[in-house]
Image: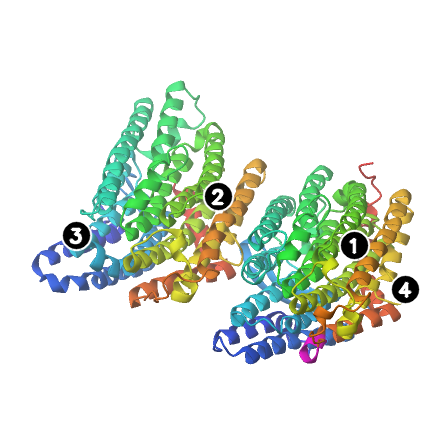
Amino acid sequence: MAVDWSLMNLEIATAVLGLGLLLLGLIIPHSARRGLGWLTVLGLAGILALSVGAWSHQGMLYNGMYIVDNYSTFFKEVFLTAAILVTMGSMRYVDEQVGYQAEYYGILVFALLGMMVMASAGDFITLYLGLELMTIAFIILVALRKTDGKSVEAGLKYVLLAGLSSAVLLYGLSLIYGLTGTVNIIQIAFLLAGGSVSSVLILGLVMLVAGVGFKISAVPFHMWAPDVYEGAPTPITAFLGAGSKAASFAIVLRLFVAGFSGIWQDWALLVAILAAITIVVGNLVAIPQTNIKRMLAYSSVAQAGYILVGVVTASPAGLKAVLFYALLYVFATVGAFTVVGNFFAQTGSDEIRDYAGLSQRSPLSAAMMLIAMLSMAGIPPLAGFAGKLYLFATVVQGYLWLVIIGLVMSMVSVYYYLRVTLVMYRDEPLDPAPITVSFPVALTMIIAMIATLVIGFYPGPLANITDVAARSFFVLH
Amino acid sequence: MNNFPVLSVILFAPVAGALLLVFIPPDENKLIKAVAATATFVSLALTLYLYLLYDKSVGGLQFVERIPWIRDLGVTYFLGVDGISLPMLLLISLIGFTAIFASWNVNMRPREFFILFLTLVTGVMGTFVAQDLFIFLLFYEVVVIPIYIMVVIWGSSKRVTKEYAGMKLTIYLLIGSAFLLVAVIAVFMQALAITGTPDFSIYGLAQVAFPAAFQRWTFAFMLFGFGSLLSMWPFHSWSPDGYAGAPTAVSMVHAGVLKKIGGYGLIRIALYVLPVGAAYWAPVIAVLGVAGAAYAAFGALAQKDLKYIVGYSSVSHMGYVLLGIASLNVIGINGAVANMFAHGIMAALFFSTIGFVYEKTHTRWVPDMGGLFQQMPRVGVAFVLAGLASLGLPGLISFVPEFTIFLGSFGRYGGLSVVAIATIVVTALFVLRAVANTLYGPRREEYDHLTDIRGPEMVPLVVLGGVMVLGGLVPSLLFDMINSGVAPLMASVTHTLQIGGLF
């Protein structure tokens, strides 16, 4: 069978970029390594351009092991956007707080490659391969601040819990393989359709939910998130929150909406309940936090709950809502964490009370934080409002309780977001020294801000793109 | 003229002002206020122009602008005004303009203050001109965040801290809006399921025949959302605290117009789109309205802080508005809309006057005041004018609307209307007592150094007081306009209103 390698152009280019960065780090002198950040941005931007060009190039490789459709390409573009923004936002942080530029950027690109494989995974093996590539890269990145006890602790926690969850996921996958005799998701969908649901299948499903629940930090599998988010270098937290979560949703959709569509009624309620618990717990626990990274971690738990709402109906509308939200969530998350990282690089603090008077010390940072948080809270005219409208519109018929819980809790979330706003805007600064924003960081913030506003004001174009992507998902299955 | 997007200009003139302010140095106090005043004046002048130009004999939506916005949701950037929304637009234009002058003495971070204020004004305007539910919601929630920031930075703490007041106000309104949002999404999806084409326009949704049971629960959600914004009893408790904590301009806009979005939404959206639900819940609205009117009137009787007195009295007045809406006939709803306008003007004048009194005497505590008429006759005039309008004196703007509400509701809710009418006596009692204890009585020497309002500070008195007298003497200016909007709306829902209510 002829293999159309051009379908994998993006992955090949990404792998080359990652290896190239590692190699370059070995040959170029220490002082020149600061330029690696821009090189990474350029390379990633090139790959993003390539992916836009390859939008209509769809197909399958190796009998459905690897699926390239608009759906997976859209997700790859989401990951690339996140990676570009994270890289730009983190240059100064890496130079001053981490070091190891070659390793940092190189491994970041490999984490990206893992996400891309996950988005295109057509069977369990590919899926697991991508997941592990991403996870192992993240373990290194989380623990990269070797001299910081918190970073190492976070790394160890991530190793243990990621390992555990991978084991659970793998066990679930193997049970389903045992039942159907295949690892191919499309064939599994065919075999499960219309059949009876055995208790072993239920057990496998539960294991899968637990395994991916960890990856998307859904309650009750979210315990690792605040600790790891707090301890990891802040840009990595941003990438973990935006990229890793989006990639995990890519496999959630592939597994549940494509693979288990035949037994939809058996898992829909489970996912709906999981979404509701995640939204409630994430938002409520975020309220008492005093560390901004922990607060954003719990808020990202809540956001995972919102996105799960789009999975419940297993419909093109739900899928489209997930894709839509995934992109706008990238801008909000990376924007907020870029502010946090930049602030930490200069003050050494992540405490919310130290953000006092940020609107006077750095108006751009304060505005970015405000816009990111209001977008996450779903206040119009920011992107989060349109995103939540798409998500909740899919479940309003049949799961009205979920809509009520979700919208009321997102209004509750305004409470803790506004607390930060209050500190930034009302209070006088403790230390009036301005917070400088370097060019790449400012660029990241401005892009994230404009994107959040534009998607909020004029969601039409993105809605069309995600619509096409969601439809392509159902064509192949 | 036909192609000139005059509503968009009205809507975005304040935003343009706010953007301009970003580039003005933060310490240019006078320039900042002049820019803010100019921006709101543009809106006011154009709104007045539209008010005169509106063809009442044709009625319906006029000055329409339509641009397709989000195709897959059927959202259009759809602006237009009818006889209900035009008075409301005029109200926010008047209050937005005068509130700038009521805040003439804000000298703490004035640039941020006026940027937030202009954003707030645009948000409120947008809700009245938007004919698309999505765009309506967009503007509806835009107002919440500026208000919160303004309350906590420029507000005042007396009985409760301004942080508490601001957060209480925000959470109440946001929780209300969450339920509103649930109802809107449900209505949209149901309409999509019935007609097959997505359409977010209010007119489009009103053409869909929703099942009765569906209308009942969605109307209840909307009633909760709009009702808590209108400070419908028992969801009113944010209102006195919020007004007491807020800076003058925010109290003016909030009590004057923002609340009215609740009443406007109930009539123009909930009743129009879900008439069966409205008929079902109307008795409940009437009971809650009258209970609120009576409860808040007695609540005001017990207050000694001027802002709390006006805060409770505004809850009480909104009770009349709810009674008017619940009557579900043209007369009652005409009265409700007119009363919203009248109360807006009156509350704005009240709050701006209290703001000046507080600025000068540093107290709002009624027992600490007295004889102020002697030192500040102009403040006194404004206060008396607002007070007399509040108790519905014939010849001022609020007499005819209240009379109309009682007329419209009496046939349907005889006993309740009697209770509501009786409440006016209590209102008269607390208003006259507050006026007497603040303005009259022996001269107090500690206030001899106070200067009366002058110059720009006179603008609220002149403009709002003028409207108050004009509206009282020539009520047809207001009523003809409102009737041209209410009559066709009621005509389109009347056939479904024959179905009985809850009890």
What kind of residue is marked 4?
Pro
- Where residue B92 sits: x, y (%)? 69, 66
Please identify the quadrant where the C terminus of chain A is shown. Answer: top left
- Residue receiving disc 2: A318
- Secondary structure of the residue carrying tag 2 is helix
Residue B317: give its label: 1
On whether residue B243 falls in the magenta region, the answer is: no
Q: Earlier in the sequence, mark 2 or mark 3?
A: 3
- Residue receiving disc 3: A103
Q: Earlier in the sequence, mark 4 or mark 1?
A: 1
Residue B394: give its label: 4
- Secondary structure of the residue carrying tag 4 is loop
Residue placed at 13% from the left, 64% from the top? A32
Give the CA distance from mark 2 to mark 1: 45 Å
Give the CA distance from mark 2 to mark 4: 58 Å
Residue B78: give its label: none
What kind of residue is marked 3?
Glu
Note whether A23 is above or below B36 in the view shown. Answer: above
Graded by Cα atoms within 10 Å as few (under 14), some (14 to 19) or many (20 or more), the crowding at tag 1 reads many
Q: Are marks 2 and 1 in contact (CB under 8 Å)?
A: no
- Where residue B167 sits: x, y (%)? 57, 51
Give the CA distance from mark 1 to mark 3: 68 Å
Q: In the image, which is nearer the foreground, mark 1 or mark 3? A: 1
